[in-house]
Amino acid sequence: MPIYLDHNATTALDPRVLEAMQPYLTGPYGNPSSVHRYGRAARDAVEAARAQVAALAGARPSELVWTSGGTESNNFALKGATEGVKPTRVLYGATEHPAVLETAEALAARGWGVETIAVNTDGLVDWPAFEAQLRRAPLRIAAVMVANNETGVLQDVPRAAALVHACNAWLLADAVQAAGKIPLDFAASGADLMSLSSHKLYGPKGIGALLVKAEVELAPLLHGGGQERGLRGGTENVAAIVGFGAAAELAQAELQARAAHLLQLRGQLIAGLHQLPGVIIFGEAAPRLPNTVQFGLKGWEGEALLMALDRKGIAVSSGSACSSGKGEPSHVLIGMGLPRDVAYGAIRVSLGKDNTAAEIERFLQMLGELQAQQQAA
């Protein structure tokens, strides 16, 4: 049987989520902006889902703006916060998702001073270096992700927020990988903006959200229609929004049980990896998501190992699904100071709520056989 171990790339749609979406795919079809009964029914569904997703993230419904996913949310936060103001500086963590890195590069082309926030060998923010960096020049916004999509490393977002706020600037916290795996509290985090995505927590693809504190002024990326308080024009995808809401409610209700299950599987996986020769687990000493392990296996290039496992029916990743296939080593591992040859060998296993101990055992067996074949060759 095939084994799927790439849940940080995407997750399967939960049948219960599909059930919640079904009426809005085949039944009520009103535009949420229409004032007649059909429109009001759609608007009620959108607002109910808004409350569900906000509750998962510890936010107020009024702080949530619908987007198409995490990439749009990060673009919206960084571009919206910098539009129409005199360019100063934008900072972002060295291990941020490409949606942040490439948006920052686009801002640099517009005259913004863009700088990387250094991390240590565990992937955690280098706090003394960050504090010194903040003192050097005015700052508009900084991006520090809650959980890394490759290593699973968790950052101290409240600490980052306090430092950034002392500079009269805003903090964006990318919580796309964190939501549904660890508790989130937008208010307590200190973040001014937080990005979320449905398909990372067993909801539909193509729908996400950006949480925005009331005092943050954003210029919209999309104009026309006036939806989402004028911040994100376009008719809402009601069925997908309802699905995101259902997935968020399930994730909140099952958070503890899912996390306990994932931690048990992760412990089994790590114990098995330590039995293999030449294994390096990246970020192992840092606090991490309960479902994520990124490692390198001596003698293997990551893409080659990925394909060897795929031929055995096992799906893993060599890093971010948004940047795989580019022939470059993981920027996350390079940012952590690892040599390029080590970074080239990275494999990411990201567990899901429906994985089993038997599947982990099978994966370890296949990995051991491949390693033995490699050493014998």
Image: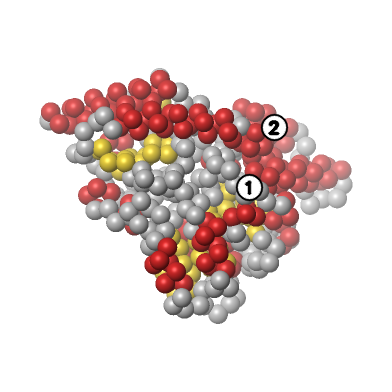
Is 7 left, or right, of 315 in this rendering? right
- Mark nearest the camera among 1 and 2 is 1
In x, y percent, where is residue 109?
44, 72
How packed mark 1 is, by other alpha carbons closer than 10 Å (few <14, some 14-19, many 20 or more), is many
Find numbered disc 2 in the image and state the secondary structure of the residue it sits on: helix
Disc 1 designates what residue? 57
The image quarter containing residue 300 is top left
Please tell me which residue is depicted at 87% across the width and 47% down the height of the picture.
36
Q: Tell me, yes or no, if residue 362 can be seen here.
A: yes
Whether the residues at callouts 1 and 2 have beta carbons within 8 Å, the answer is no
Please tell me which residue is depicted at 69% across the width and 32% down the height of the picture.
20
Residue 87 versus residue 51 in the image, above or below: below
In x, y percent, where is residue 88?
50, 77
Q: Distance between the residues labelled 1 and 2?
A: 20 Å
Q: The disc labelled 2 sits on which kind of residue?
A: Ala
Q: The disc labelled 1 sits on which kind of residue?
A: Ala
Colour scheme of the rendered structure: secondary structure
In x, y percent, where is residue 350?
43, 37
Q: Please give the label number shown on residue 20.
A: 2
- Between discs 1 and 2, the one toward the N terminus: 2
Please tell me which residue is depicted at 33% across the width and 30% down the height of the picture.
271
Is 250 left, or right, of 51 in this rendering? left
Residue 166 versus residue 370 in the image, above or below: below
Residue 228 versus residue 184 in the image, above or below: below
How packed mark 2 is, by other alpha carbons closer than 10 Å (few <14, some 14-19, many 20 or more), is some
Front-most of residues 336 and 149 = 336
